[in-house]
Amino acid sequence: MATESSSPPNPPAAGGTPQNSATETVQPANEVKQDAAPQNPKSVFVNSEPIREDQVQNAVKFLSHPKVRDSPVFHRRNFLEKKGLTKEEIDEAFRRVPDPSPSAQPTVTNQVGQGVTTSTIQPTSVSQTPVPIITVPSSASPSMFALARSRFHWYHAVFAVGLLAASGAGTAIWVKKSMIPRLKSWIRWVVMEEKNGDGGITNIKPTLAEEAAAAAKAAAAAASDVAKASQEMMISRYEEKVNMEKFMDLMQMQVKEIRSMGSAIKHLEGRSDKIERTHLVEHGGHSGSITKLKPTYPNGNKPEIDSHSARSSLPPTSADKSAPPHPNSYMDDINDQPPNPNQQISNPRLAPRSKPWEGAYQAKTSSRGGFGSALNGEGGSDFGAQNNEASNQVDAQSTVPWWQKKNSRITETDYVEAKPGSTTVVQTNEQPPIQRTWVPPQPPPVAMPEAAEAIRRPKSKKEAEPVSQETSGEGFSAAEVTDELQRITKISESGGEVEEMHSGGQGTNGALGGLKLSEIEEEPVQSY
Amino acid sequence: MNVSKTPFNGYSVKFSPFYEDRLAVATAQNFGIIGNGRVHVFSLPPTPTGALTEIISFDTADGVYDLAWSESHDSLLIAAVADGSVKLFDTNLPPPQNPLRSFQEHTREVHGVDYNPTRRDSFVTASWDDTVKLWSLDRPASIRTFKEHAYCVYSVAWNPRHADVFASASGDCTVRVWDVREPGSTMIIPGHEAEILYCDWNKYDECLIATSSVDKSIRVWDVRNYRVPIASLNGHGFAVRKVKFSPHHRNLMMSCSYDMTVCMWDFMVEDSLVGRYDHHSEFAIGVDFNVLVEGLVASTGWDQMVFVWQHGTEPRGP
């Protein structure tokens, strides 16, 4: 990233050393920590603790354990991270334990092929390069092993099939040889018993047969009953259907009569919309008429009527996009690919609004570099007109929106007075009350004295920086730079000149902001 | 006090940073397990009660897990979709002309997306493929991929004051703080003993970060001393799905949980719970503060409801 060279008060050496060169001993890290903390506001997000030797010792013991050796390196690293070791400590532990397994370092992938980040990972790349090399042979070996295993599998499969066949054949032979004679002898024994035990067994057997026959008969009877019943049902259904149709025909005739009577009445009354009415009735009239009659129909015929009404009512409802036909079913025919992948992203209509925390803190680092350059590229003259449009739309609301009313911060009178203004006026009304009642907390004592100093520097200096970078000064007052209202009115006054956006408004950028603006400008300027 | 019912189960709700009365809701069919998704854009009606008016809605082939409004363009929405794509919608264009872009790079579900509020030109996405990706609206591919987490990354959040710093919360029980100018993470906070579902920065103190976890607690950390949390907020009965800091008060936070409640907290006070709303009848999955209107909050959940109300009043109306 090209931004790194121009990044503001972040001396990458100071802020980065604790994490990058883990080979350093504890002492340099201590010094760096003391230096880095006051100077570099960014360093709060970096581990500035020295490497804890006891933790590193624990980690080394953990990593030397044979069971741990077998587990994937990624898991080992994650375990140590969960235990609360910092990156440097983990790296140090890995360094101390001879570790021939694949990559333990986090992989850094850059999508667009930016090699610039490699400049910052020089110290870690030393440890990384031997590891990727090891990765290659080790990745090759698992694949070979997998291949061998697969071959082994194939032979294994053949062997298994053969074994199954053999066992099947053996079972068949065994059954033939031993089971069948046994079965025969058992049958002979039964027959003998039958001959001997005349009374009992002969009684049992016929009863068995009789019972079976009786059961079969009963089953047959039941089946025939069922068949009869179903046939009857079908006949009755058919009859009902016929009756239904007759009924419907009669009703339709009646409806027609009523319709004609109605039209006659309307004719008499001399209404002109009757023509449209009859049209509607003809097209969607089936649905209308049938739905009216729904409650009077017996239950069994409801489905048919519903289907009628559904079919005929489909044309009117298909025009209504918002109601999905099957809200709960799984629709898988949605094409959510962009219809025009090269479609230009349209200009924003509104300026980005400042956040409540930004206004209060006065150390705004926001840069509308991306946004501003968009306007630059596409032409800022649209902006003024569109802003007026937006404000006009809001003015259409005559009542005070309820969510504004309940807001205890905004007094009713203030809001109502300002109502004729635009949305931005509303916003400014919100801003002062919030600032009045909210007491900014004490700035952190150590964190960014440089930034605080920059903030307290005279405003002209801050103004000058961004202005000089963007455009020539428009001569607007530097007095109320944090006043949203002034900024927006200037924009509308000057007809939407874009330059206002950059250097106006929250010009309380410190050195941070000024430099940041530049770094942002470099990046996306070509894109818009 | 405004309620609306969405056809699908709600996953995320976000107020627009440009319009006080506009919000977007990300929904997914069948609780997001399978099926389609839809992004709704609602407008608040002028009356205190009544349904939200839907301005426009966009269908997607898979559930939408999260969305973010662009901070640079008032009509653009980024949607994180369960099929791994990141979609850009323009609410000024009709649905047939949408989405404007569909970035398909993540190999698994995209679960979180956040737009840079200070630089306003980039956004990050968090995915279940263990990576976080940095994007810009004008580029067809991601700018960077951050791959360090050992498990699904559930959420990302930009620091409101430092344009290059963001944090990611992951199922590997850690929160990582990243700087886009550095190759790897700059800080690893082993915040909980269970998966961390969400992280959010304090808007008034750039060093405070809150995390919500499956262990039912919310912890507030100071990155300058991250071994011990500043506060540990207990009170939810089940996993806490989201936690948000208020854009108007330094100490106020809001959270939603699988115990179907939305809770308000003040982490500097001994008994931190300052409010509890029990209006959902299913998992409460999404909450948001309105940046432009103080006290206005919204929540959504798997009961397909979207509520918008003033903190301190009854969400379901009088």
Image: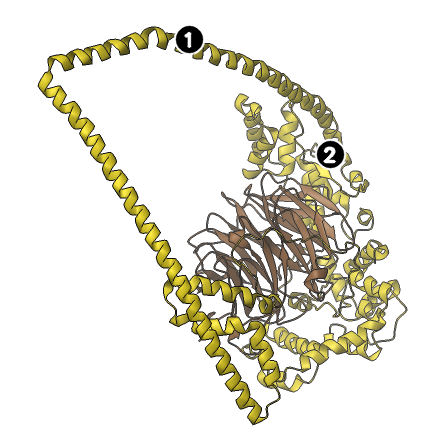
Chain colours: A yellow, B brown
The residue labelled by disc 1 is: A170
Nearest the viewer among A67 and A87 is A67
Q: Residues within 10 Å of mark 2 (few under 14, many from 20)?
A: some
> Which amino acid, by three-letter code, is at mark 1?
Gly
Location of residue A296 in the rendering, given as x and y in whole percent from the top left corner: 38, 72
The residue labelled by disc 2 is: A124
Q: Is there any visible trace of residue A187 in the rendered image? A: yes
Separation of marks 1 and 2 at Cα, in angstroms: 66 Å
Q: Residues within 10 Å of mark 1 (few under 14, many from 20)?
A: few
Location of residue B309 in the rendering, given as x and y in whole percent from the top left corner: 52, 70
Label number found at residue B130: none
- Disc 1 is placed on an element classified as helix
Nearest the viewer among B315 and A124 is B315
Location of residue B117 in the rendering, given as x and y in whole percent from the top left corner: 69, 60
- Disc 2 is placed on an element classified as helix
Picture quarter containing residue B114?
Answer: bottom right
Rendered view: A367 above or below B128: below
> Which amino acid, by three-letter code, is at mark 2?
Thr
Most distant residue in the bottom direction: A269
Rendered view: A154 above or below B227: above
Badge 1 and badge 2 in a common chain: yes
The quarter of the image holding the C terminus of chain B is bottom left
Position of B237 compared to B290: left or right?
A: left
Location of residue B205 in the rendering, given as x and y in whole percent from the top left corner: 62, 59
Q: Is there any visible trace of residue A479 in the rendered image? A: no
Rendered view: A19 above or below A405: above
Position of A216 compared to A470: left or right?
A: left
